[in-house]
Each structure stands twice: as structure tokens, then as C-alpha cells.
Image (cartoon, rainbow, N blue to C red):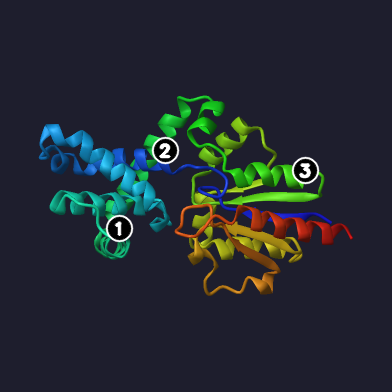
Amino acid sequence: MLFRFYLDFDGVIAHSAIECVNNAFIAWLETNHDLFNKIENNYKSSLKKLIVDFSISKRYFVIPPEHYYCLIDTIFHELRLNNKTPSDNYIQKLFEDNVSSTSLKTLEKFKFNFFRIRDKKSNSQSDTDWVKENPPTIFIEKFYMLTENYPIEIFIVSRKNYKAIEKWFLGSKLPIDEIYGNEALGRFNNNKFELIQSLQLANGNKKAFFIDDMISEFALDDWENINVITLQAGWGYNDLEDNTQEILNIIKENLNDLLN
């Protein structure tokens, strides 16, 4: 019997925050260039670095990609007004307010520009260079070593776009069975549970793992009913402690039970 894994991509498989945030800043700038141009020239470079660095550290606030706009916009205005790094709780509150107040039109425009910029960049790079820009996590390297002799399926379920994920796996040369990116999630109300529920139904609800770094992905839904064990990736984009080895141990125990 094949044992199935549903894996998130950003943070779980690849360290993609630096690449994502830098491209998101460029997309944000396309809408806010007049605002940014009012900044003193001798301060622009250092302000950009502060915005990007702080956005990377708060990457875990973002779930749908269009919310990169709200993260960068929030941090820009806060740093510009107060010229100091705000507390985690305060910046999260400001971010949530920004998400609520930003128009759908603005978010959709940003999302289009964000993927356009990322696609242009990734298309200009080799598959191998794309992996270098989004290096694999220690977890995924050990995961493939651990599971290489077991009968498993690996399905990627991510809010990242399909092409970017496919390019990464082509560059890494790691085996993969299916990729369900942002486009596929759109057919399931942008809900990972609904997508995985559909896949489990087609699979006869055989036992599976779902590994993600966002607690919100596990909330409220009945994962037990579809025979999926959910595991929170503490090494990903969140404020949890790294639990790489703990998760690997759980996987190993279940794989050994499968063969016994």
C-alpha cells in the first residue's frame, strides 16, 4: 500500500521567503512608487532593506500571496512614521487591519504583478539556479533520505503557483507525484482541506500525512474523518521552535508500522 504525504512548499520544503519578499516589494512599489519617491534619496536604500528584512521575519503572517502587499505596506508606513521596529503583536494587529481595509481591486492587481515579476525572474534562470535562490530545508533533505526505500506518494499542496514549484523540483531532481499550486486551490475555495478531502476521497481515505507550517491550515476542519494526520512544521514560517527531528521520528514510526 502506498503511503501518501501532502506537503506544503514555502517554508516546509524550500526557504523561499527572501525570493518572495524581494519580488513582492517590487510589485508593491509598482502601485506605490509615488509614495516611495517622496522618501529622501539617501534613506531609500536603507529603508528598503529594513522593509524587506522585517517582512521576511514576519513572513508567517501571509497566507494568500496577495497579502504580501498588506505586510509590506504595513511595515513601510510604520517604519516611515516611527523610524523604529514595532513589537510583534502591534505589527500583527496593523497587518490584520491593513488586510481588512485594502480593496480587492488593489490586492488582485498586486497579485497579478507579483506573479508576473516572479515568472519573469524564474523564466530567466535555470532550474538549478532557481533552487539556489530557494534552497531546500534540512527537513526535506532528510525526508527524502528517510523515505527512499518506502512505498510512498508525495503530493505538494501549496499557495505558491504551479510553475514555480515545478521548476524547483526539476532543478532539485527530487521525485514528486503531483503538484497542486495556487491555481488548483482556487477551484476549492482556496481551502487546502477541501482540496485534500477531494484527493482522499479518490484515494479511498487511506492514511496520509499533511505537513504545513501554518496553524490556521489545520483549524476547524475534521482531518481525522478523512484519515489525515496533520503535523505542524516548526522549522517553517511561524514563531514555533524547530521540530524537524521530532516530525521525522513520527514519520519513521508510521512507515515502519506500515511495513509490519
Q: Is residue 188 above or below residue 162?
A: below
Instruction: Kindly state the secondary structure of the residue where label 2 is placed.
Output: helix
**SS for tag 3?**
loop
| Disc marking residue 19 | 2
Left or right of 171 in this view: 125: left
What separation in Å lies between label 1 and label 3 (alpha carbons)?
44 Å
Local crowd size for mark 2, using a 10 Å CA cut-off: few (<14), some (14–19), many (≥20): some
| Circle 2: residue type | Glu
Give the mark, 3 or 2, whose residue is nearer the N terminus.
2
> Three-letter amino acid code at disc 3?
Glu
Q: Which mark is residue 33?
A: none
- Label count reads 3
Residue at position x 59%, y 57% in the image: 243
Quadrant for residue 208, please give it.
Answer: bottom right
Identified at 68% across, 47% down, the residue is: 143
Residue lying at the far right in this picture: please name it: 260
CA gap between label 3 and label 2 equals 29 Å
224, 244: nearer the viewer: 244
Q: Quadrant of residue 248?
A: bottom right
Q: Amino acid at mark 1?
A: Leu
Q: Is residue 47 left or right of residue 54?
A: left
Q: CA distance from mark 2 to mark 1?
A: 24 Å
Label at residue 104:
1
Q: Does residue 177 show up?
A: no
- Counting from the top left corner in percent of width and height, residue 94 is at 26, 62
Which of marks 3 and 1 precedes in the sequence? 1
The spot of residue 252 in percent (x, y) is 75, 55
Q: Counting residues from the N terminus, which is met first, the one under dot 2 or under dot 1?
A: 2
Q: Secondary structure at mark 1?
A: helix
The image's mark for residue 148 is 3
Q: Residue at x 28, y 49 (%)?
A: 72
